[in-house]
Amino acid sequence: MKKAYLILQNGRIFEGIRFGAEGDVTAEIVFTTGMTGYIETLTDPSYHGQIVVQTFPLIGNYGIIPDDFESPAPKLSAYIVREPCDTPSNFRSEETLDDYLKRMGIIGLYGVDTRALTKIIREYGTMNASVLSEIPENIAAYTRELAGRELSSDVYAVSCRKPFAASGEGSPHIVLWDFGFKGSIAGKLMARGCKVTVVPASSTAADILALKPDGILLSNGPGDPQVCTEIIENLKELLKSKIPTFGICLGHQLLALARGAERMKLKYGHHGANQPVRDTETGRLYITSQNHEYAIIPESLPEGAHMSFVNVNDLTCEGIGYGDMPAFSVQFHPEASAGPTDTEFLFDVFLTMVGGNRNAAK
């Protein structure tokens, strides 16, 4: 067993044991509270550039199941668990967590007190961290430098390189603008009979309009929406077409910024499958799956827009409806995967909007 050390920018050090791939890494550290769904967490592109800590103590007990992947390969920087299971029990499993991380080149660390680590992140806030083979001699100087590093995730690094048909047949035709989309989002659309064309983050408004979509879905993805200036400018142009648009997670934030709203960074983000939100119109509560570090400031919403969902825990914005155009968005993941399916009906709301727009155009 090889030891390694998790060093936080606030000076705290955790000793652990390596599994998965070897090596050192520096990235932003976050925790996720899902009790299941570690496969989906590992393959969610929204974790690009992050060290992910699982709060649930035993991870890997049902192995690795490719049919449950959200993308072809993990994009996170490192994976930290209390205890990995090396003897999974599931008839669908094809390999162990350790073998998968080794094969994909992802650094793992176990034997860490993830409860104590999570409490530190929760109180201090999201911070930079390193996984190192040895503790630096001048740890004070190292952590000062670590705290000052500008680390970021990259939408373009997780987006597809060229357009492709996720489903070449069906109706209506939905263009899924890929900022690091989870495969289950396309799956929910295809299950409803849609033709789905996925386009890269670098697409222009003209590129998307040339595909003659009936609706546009703005996907999830990693990082700060405010740095996506080219995407926001193209989205502003695209919205002039009045094509029904549905934003999820990062797509929700980009849509809001394109309409003039502002964003803020949360203290430690929302990561996990147990985030409660309230429908501001009906008062009904839903349990949702979430993965984001930023939120839209409610007071910055443009005229005609309203907050449709609010987070019950911290009262942050979880959804926006736009009264002057056929568009809406949510901060959470209605496709879940993993997580509760309480809000999957939002795909039907979107397709009803698309159908209404198509009928009105006839």
Image (cartoon, rainbow, N blue to C red):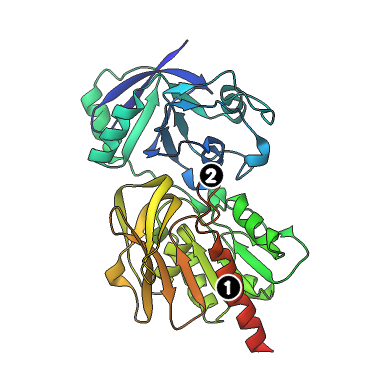
Q: Is residue 163 visible?
A: no
Dot 2 alpha-carbon crowd within 10 angstroms: few under 14, some 14 to 19, many 20 or more: many
174 or 103: nearer the viewer: 174
The residue that appears at 61% across and 63% down in the rendered structure is 176
Report the residue that reaches farthest toward the left: 140
What's the amino acid at mark 2? Ala
**Residue in the image at 67% along x and 57% along y:** 162
Q: Position of residue 105 (x, y in %)?
A: 57, 29
Residue 287: x, y in percent? 43, 52
Left or right: where 32 falls relative to 69: left
Quick one: which residue is furthest to the right in this view? 169
Indicate the quadrant containing the C terminus: top left, top right, bottom left or bottom right.
bottom right
> Where 167 falls versus 58 (above or below)?
below
- Dot 1 amino acid type: Ala
- The dot on residue 152 is none
Q: Circle 1 is placed at which residue position?
A: 205
Say how many tags the image has: 2
**Residue 338 image label:** 2
* Local secondary structure at mark 1: helix
Measured as percent of width and height from the top left, residue 181 is found at 57, 53
Q: Position of residue 344 (x, y in %)?
A: 55, 59
Q: Earlier in the sequence, mark 1 or mark 2?
A: 1
Disc 1 to disc 2, C-alpha distance: 32 Å
Secondary element at tag 2 = loop
